[in-house]
Image: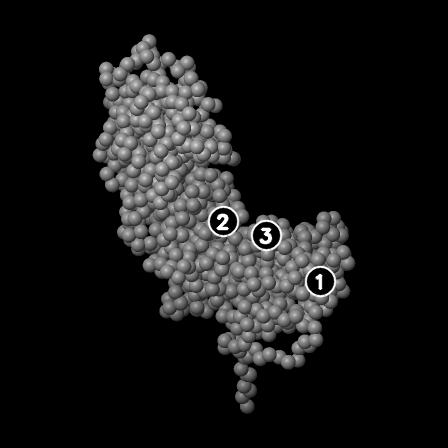
C-alpha cells in the first residue's frame, strides 16, 4: 500500500518553508547564530515575504557569514568589516522596494563599524539591522568586543575592564525607530520581534544575545546560555498579529500595549514592567540604564516610533527603484543641454 | 614687448609713441580672500571673453575662509593660449598685506593699479602706476557700509575696463546676465563698475601699452569650470545615486551635479529620479556607491587625495566583487593634507592600484572641460560594461578654474547598461554563473536584486570565490577568477577613450602628457619651434590601461618627454611598467610640482636643458 507524503505546509503566498532555507551552516555546532538564522527563516516564511524581494547584507565576522545559511533565493552582499551600513544604504537607495536584512556582529558594529552604525541609525533607513551579539571576536579566536560586559571573563582568564556599550540605548538615542533585544535561545520572543520588524517601516535595530559556544560560553561569561537563562529580564511579552492573520482572541490583553504597524498588522506588548510605554524615548533609555545598575539584561521591544519619516521619504524619490529607471527618465533631453550651453556663453 | 625707459618713470606721457600690446597679457588681481572679489573677477574675465578675445581665469587661493591673500590670474591671449603665464604684466593690488611682494613681481614696463594709500609708485619706478582712491569712491556711491567690500571690487573692474579699452557696454551686459532677476544687485554692481570707469576716464592718463581689442574668436563658445562639466556629464549619463563627503577641490563637482539634478530630474509629480547623500566620510560614500551599483544604480562619488586614500579598502572590494561605480578624483597637492587649494597630478599611481592585493582600476583622464563632460559620461558606461569601479582623474586647475570651450555635444549613443540578465533570460537559460567568462570578453553576466526568478540570486563577497560566486579557498578556482580579472583589464585597452594625436609631424622627438598639462604643453611646443626651430610630436593620453597607440607612439620616436605635475614622474612610471624593456630607456621626464598650474616656460626650459639647446 502506497503511503502518501503529507503536502508541505505553504505560507500565504503559497511557498513551502524549503524555499526560505539557505546553505549548510559552517558555524560551530550549537552557535547561537544558527538559531537566529532559523528564526529569520520562520519570520520571512510566516510573513509571506517573497524570497527574491529580500536583500541580505553583512560585514565581516562569524555573524556576517550567516546570511549564507538562510534564504538562498535572495541576493546577498558580504562586504568589508564594519561597513555594511554604507553598502546597505546604497542598495536601498537603488531599490527601496526590497526588504533589507543586515546581519552584523558586536565587533562589526560596536568597534570597527561604530561610525557607520551611528549614521545608519540616524538616517532611519528602512532596513532590519540584526546584531548577533556574543561579546567576543570568534573568527580571530576570542578577543573581547566592545559589548562585552565589565568584569566578564574569557576562557583564558582575561577579565574585561572596560564598560560595555549598550547598543540598544545608543540606537534609541541616535534615531532608530524600532529597537529591541532578544536572546538566540528564546524562540517565541525572537520570532515575534522579527515578524514585527518585517512590518516596520524604518530602521529596526535588534540586538540578539547569541552565546559563542567555543569562546564565550563558560563560567564567568555574561553572554553564555546559562547566564542568559538566569539573568534575562523581559520587559514585555511580545505577540505579533500579521495583517493577513485572523485576530487571535486568546492573547491576554490584560495589560497590553498595542502598536499598529505600517502594513496594518499589530504588535502587542504585554507589559511586565509597570508603566512601560515603548513610544517614550526617554523612558526607554532610562529603563536600560537602570537595568545596568541592577546587573539585569533586559529583553523585549524597548522603543517604537511609527511616525518618523524614513530616509527614503526624506529623499522624496520616485516609487520605482532608482536602479532600473529607464533612460527616458534619467537622461535629460537635448533641449536641456542646449539651454545650459546658451546660459554659459 | 614694448621698450621702456625707466627714467621717464611715471611722468611718461601719452602711449601713442610706443608699440601697443594687444590681447596678449596677463592680469593679476590680488585681494584678500573672503572679500567677495570672485564675482568681480569673473565679470572682468567674461568681459574680455565678451570682446571676443580668448581668455582664461585661474584662482590661486589659500586654504582659508577669510583674511588670507588670494590672486586671480586673467590671461588674454589672441593666440588662444590658456595656461598660466609665469609673469603677469598688470597688477590690481587690493590687498595691503601682499601688495609689496606683488608689485615687485611685475616685469619692467608692467602696470600697477592700486589703492592710492598703498603708494606703490615708491616701490617701483619702472612700472606704470595708477593710484585709485577705491575707498573714497566706494564711500561716495555706497552708503551701506556692509556692502562696500563688494562694490569696491566692482570699481576695480570699471577702472581696468577703462584703461584696457574694454567696452563698458560689454561689462554691463555681463552683469545683466549674471544678475538677471535681481535688479537691485545689478544696480549696485554696475554702479560700482561705472564709478570706476568714470573715475579712470576723468583722472587717469593712459600711458601703458596694454589694450584689449575686439576679436571674433569666441563665437558660440562657452566658459565653464571642469567640476561643473563633470557634474553635467554625470547628469547626462543618467546618474541615479550620488554619495559624497565634502573636500576641496572636488566639492563643486557634487554641488554642480546636485543643482542640475534638482533642475532636470524631478518628475511632473515632484518626485526625484535621483538620490544625493552627504555621507559621514569617504568610506561611507564609496560604500554607498558600491551598494547602489550592485543593486543596479548608476552611482558616483567625487573626492580628492585624502578621501581617495580612505576609499582604498572599498575600491578593492569593488574590483574583486566586480561592481560598477564612478569615482571622480579632483587632484590637489599632496602628500597628506598637502596644499589643499593648489593643483598637482600626483594621485595617478595611487588611483591606479588603490587597495591591497592585485587590484587595479581603469582611469579616464580628461584634458579639457569638454572632456570632463564626455569622459564622465563614458565612465558610467564603462563601469557598467566592465563591472568595475572606474576613476575619472582631473585636477584643481582643470576642475576649479574657468575655461573657454566649444559647446558640449549631446550624447550620440544610448546608455550602455552592461550585461544584466532579466527573469526572462534566466527562464530561458535555466540559471547562470556570475563570474563565468561565457562570451570571451572576460566579463560575466550579473543579475540585480529583486529579479523575480528563483535562479536570480547570487552571493556577492570580497572573500575568495569561484566563477559561480561560491566561497572557495581552492588555489585553482581562486586563480581562475584572478586571471579572468587580469584579462578583463587587458581588454579594456580597446574599450577606453583612445589617446589624441595632437601633433604628428614625424619628428624624432615625442611628448606624452595628460590632463591640465595639455594647455601649457601646446604653448611650449610653439615656443620650442620659435626659439629652437625644433618640431616635436605630441600624443595626449586619455586613459589607463594604455592603448596600443601609446606603445606605437613611443616605438616610433627616438626620445619621449613625459610632462606631468608631480615629483615622482608617476605617468612615466606607469608607462615603464607597461612598455617593452627596449622602449623604456627612451623616456625622459619634465616635472612641475610646486602647486601652481604648470606654465609653458617651465616645460620649454626643462626641454632645452635636457636637449642641450
Taking the spot 42% from the left edge, 55% from the top edge, the residue there is: B274
The answer to whether residue A207 is seen in the rendering is yes
Mark positioned earlier in the residue sequence (1 or 3): 3
Residue most extreme to the top = B7
Determine crowd level at label 2: few under 14, some 14-19, many 20+ residues with C-alpha closer than 10 A: some
Q: Are marks 1 and 2 on the same chain?
A: no
Question: Where is mark 2, residue-wise?
Answer: B278
Q: Residues within 10 Å of mark 1 (few under 14, many from 20)?
A: many
Residue B602 versus residue A49 in the image, above or below: above
Q: Chain of mark 1?
A: A
Element under disc 1? strand
User: Is A136 situated left or right of B9 in this image?
Assistant: right
Spatial CA distance of label 2 from label 3 is 14 Å
Residue contact between numbered discs 2 and 3, judged by CB atoms under 8 Å = no
Q: Name the residue carrying label 3.
A: A118
The residue drawn where x is 30% and y is 36% is: B172
Camera-side residue of B420 and A202: A202
| Percent x, y of residue A277 | 67, 65
Give the class, few, some or many, for how many residues have Cα within 10 Å of label 3's Cα (few <14, many ≥20). Answer: many
Q: Secondary structure at mark 3?
A: helix
Residue in the foreground of this view, choosing between B573 and B34: B34
Could you confirm whether marks 2 and 3 are on the same chain? no
In the depicted view, which residue is nearer to us: B91 or B473? B91
Residue hosting label 1: A298
How far across and down, in percent of the image, does residue B248 sit?
46, 39
Relative horizontal placement of residue A226, taking residue A127 as reference (left or right): right
Mark 3 belongs to which subunit? A
* Tag 2 secondary structure: strand
Amino acid at each position: 500500500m502506497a503511503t502518501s507524503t503529507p503536502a508541505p505546509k505553504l505560507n500565504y503566498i503559497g511557498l513551502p518553508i524549503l524555499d526560505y532555507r539557505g546553505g549548510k551552516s559552517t558555524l560551530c555546532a550549537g552557535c547561537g547564530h544558527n538559531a537566529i538564522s532559523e528564526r529569520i527563516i520562520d519570520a520571512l516564511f510566516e510573513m509571506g515575504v517573497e524570497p527574491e524581494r529580500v536583500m541580505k547584507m553583512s560585514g565581516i565576522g562569524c555573524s556576517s557569514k550567516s546570511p549564507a545559511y538562510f534564504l538562498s533565493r535572495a541576493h546577498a552582499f558580504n562586504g568589508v568589516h564594519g561597513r555594511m551600513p554604507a553598502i546597505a544604504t546604497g542598495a536601498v537607495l537603488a531599490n527601496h522596494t526590497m526588504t533589507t536584512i543586515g546581519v552584523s556582529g558586536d565587533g562589526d558594529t560596536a568597534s570597527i563599524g561604530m561610525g557607520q552604525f551611528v549614521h545608519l541609525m540616524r538616517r532611519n533607513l528602512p532596513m532590519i539591522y540584526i546584531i548577533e551579539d556574543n561579546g567576543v571576536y570568534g573568527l580571530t579566536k576570542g578577543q573581547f568586543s566592545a559589548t562585552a560586559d565589565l568584569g566578564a571573563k574569557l576562557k583564558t582568564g582575561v577579565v574585561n575592564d572596560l564598560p560595555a556599550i549598550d547598543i540598544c540605548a545608543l540606537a534609541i538615542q541616535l534615531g532608530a525607530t524600532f529597537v529591541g533585544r532578544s536572546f538566540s535561545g528564546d524562540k517565541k520572543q525572537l520570532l515575534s520581534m522579527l515578524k514585527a520588524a518585517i512590518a516596520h517601516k524604518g530602521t529596526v535595530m535588534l540586538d540578539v544575545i547569541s552565546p559563542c559556544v567555543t569562546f564565550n560560553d563558560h563560567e564567568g561569561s555574561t553572554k553564555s546560555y546559562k547566564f542568559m537563562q538566569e539573568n534575562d529580564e523581559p520587559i514585555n511579552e511580545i505577540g505579533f498579529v500579521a495583517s493577513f492573520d485572523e485576530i487571535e482572541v486568546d492573547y491576554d490583553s490584560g495589560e497590553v500595549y498595542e502598536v499598529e504597524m505600517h502594513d496594518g498588522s499589530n504588535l502587542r506588548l504585554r507589559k511586565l514592567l509597570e508603566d512601560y510605554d515603548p513610544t517614550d524615548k526617554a523612558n526607554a533609555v532610562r529603563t536600560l540604564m537602570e537595568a545596568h545598575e541592577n546587573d539585569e539584561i533586559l529583553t523585549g521591544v524597548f522603543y517604537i516610533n511609527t511616525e518618523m519619516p524614513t530616509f527614503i521619504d526624506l529623499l522624496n524619490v520616485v516609487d520605482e527603484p532608482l536602479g532600473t529607471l529607464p533612460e527616458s527618465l534619467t537622461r535629460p533631453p537635448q533641449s536641456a543641454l542646449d539651454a545650459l550651453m546658451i546660459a554659459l556663453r | 614687448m614694448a621698450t621702456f625707459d625707466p627714467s621717464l618713470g611715471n611722468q611718461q606721457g601719452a602711449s601713442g609713441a610706443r608699440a601697443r600690446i594687444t590681447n596678449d597679457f596677463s592680469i593679476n588681481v590680488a585681494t584678500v580672500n573672503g572679500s567677495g572679489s570672485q564675482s568681480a573677477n569673473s565679470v572682468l574675465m567674461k568681459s574680455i571673453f565678451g570682446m571676443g578675445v580668448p581668455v582664461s581665469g585661474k584662482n590661486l587661493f589659500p586654504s582659508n575662509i577669510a583674511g588670507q591673500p588670494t590672486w586671480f590670474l586673467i590671461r588674454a591671449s589672441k593666440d588662444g593660449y590658456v595656461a598660466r603665464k609665469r609673469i603677469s604684466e598688470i597688477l590690481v593690488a587690493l590687498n595691503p598685506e601682499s601688495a609689496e611682494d606683488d608689485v615687485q613681481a611685475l616685469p619692467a614696463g608692467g602696470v600697477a593699479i592700486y589703492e592710492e594709500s598703498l603708494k606703490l609708485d615708491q616701490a617701483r619706478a619702472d612700472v606704470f602706476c595708477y593710484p585709485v582712491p577705491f575707498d573714497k569712491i566706494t564711500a561716495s556711491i555706497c552708503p551701506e557700509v556692509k556692502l562696500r567690500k563688494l562694490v569696491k571690487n566692482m570699481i576695480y573692474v570699471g577702472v581696468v575696463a577703462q584703461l584696457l579699452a574694454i567696452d563698458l557696454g560689454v561689462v554691463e551686459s555681463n552683469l545683466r546676465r549674471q544678475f538677471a532677476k535681481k535688479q537691485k544687485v545689478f544696480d549696485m554692481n554696475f554702479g560700482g563698475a561705472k564709478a570706476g570707469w568714470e573715475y579712470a576716464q576723468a583722472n587717469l592718463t593712459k600711458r601703458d601699452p596694454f589694450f584689449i581689442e575686439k576679436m571674433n574668436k569666441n563665437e558660440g563658445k562657452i566658459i565653464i569650470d571642469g567640476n561643473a562639466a563633470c557634474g553635467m556629464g554625470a547628469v547626462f549619463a543618467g546618474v541615479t545615486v550620488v554619495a559624497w563627503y565634502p573636500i576641496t577641490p572636488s566639492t563643486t563637482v557634487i554641488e554642480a551635479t546636485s543643482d542640475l539634478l534638482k533642475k532636470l530630474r524631478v518628475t511632473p509629480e515632484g518626485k526625484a529620479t535621483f538620490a544625493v547623500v552627504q555621507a559621514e566620510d569617504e568610506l561611507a560614500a564609496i560604500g554607498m556607491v558600491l551598494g547602489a551599483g550592485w543593486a543596479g544604480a548608476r552611482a558616483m562619488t567625487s573626492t580628492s587625495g585624502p578621501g581617495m586614500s580612505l576609499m582604498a579598502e572599498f575600491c578593492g572590494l569593488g574590483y574583486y566583487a566586480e561592481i560598477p561605480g564612478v569615482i571622480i578624483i579632483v587632484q590637489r597637492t599632496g602628500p597628506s593634507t598637502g596644499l589643499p587649494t593648489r593643483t598637482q597630478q600626483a594621485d595617478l599611481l595611487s588611483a591606479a592600484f588603490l587597495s591591497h592585493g592585485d587590484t587595479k582600476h581603469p582611469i579616464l583622464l580628461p584634458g579639457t572641460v569638454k572632456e570632463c563632460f564626455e569622459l564622465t559620461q563614458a565612465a558610467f558606461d564603462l563601469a557598467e560594461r566592465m563591472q568595475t569601479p572606474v576613476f575619472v582623474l582631473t585636477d584643481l586647475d582643470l576642475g576649479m578654474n574657468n575655461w573657454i570651450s566649444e559647446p558640449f555635444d549631446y550624447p550620440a549613443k544610448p546608455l550602455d547598461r552592461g550585461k544584466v540578465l532579466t527573469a526572462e533570460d534566466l527562464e530561458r537559460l535555466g540559471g547562470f554563473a556570475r563570474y563565468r567568462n561565457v562570451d570571451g570578453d572576460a566579463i560575466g553576466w550579473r543579475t540585480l536584486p529583486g529579479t523575480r526568478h528563483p535562479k536570480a540570486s547570487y552571493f556577492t563577497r570580497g572573500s575568495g570565490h569561484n566563477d559561480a560566486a561560491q566561497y572557495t579557498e581552492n588555489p585553482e578556482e581562486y586563480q581562475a577568477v584572478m586571471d579572468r580579472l587580469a584579462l578583463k583589464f587587458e581588454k579594456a585597452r580597446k574599450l577606453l577613450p583612445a589617446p589624441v594625436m595632437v601633433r604628428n609631424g614625424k619628428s624624432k622627438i615625442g611628448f606624452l602628457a595628460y590632463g591640465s598639462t595639455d594647455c601649457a604643453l601646446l604653448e611650449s611646443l610653439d615656443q620650442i619651434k620659435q626659439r629652437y626651430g625644433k618640431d616635436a610630436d605630441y600624443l595626449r593620453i586619455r586613459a589607463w590601461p594604455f592603448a596600443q597607440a601609446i606603445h606605437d607612439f613611443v616605438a616610433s620616436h627616438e626620445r619621449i618627454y613625459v610632462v606631468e605635475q608631480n615629483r615622482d614622474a608617476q605617468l612615466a612610471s606607469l608607462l615603464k611598467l607597461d612598455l617593452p624593456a627596449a622602449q623604456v630607456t627612451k623616456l625622459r621626464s619634465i616635472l612641475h610640482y610646486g602647486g601652481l598650474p604648470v606654465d609653458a616656460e617651465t616645460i620649454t626650459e626643462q626641454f632645452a636643458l635636457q636637449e642641450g639647446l
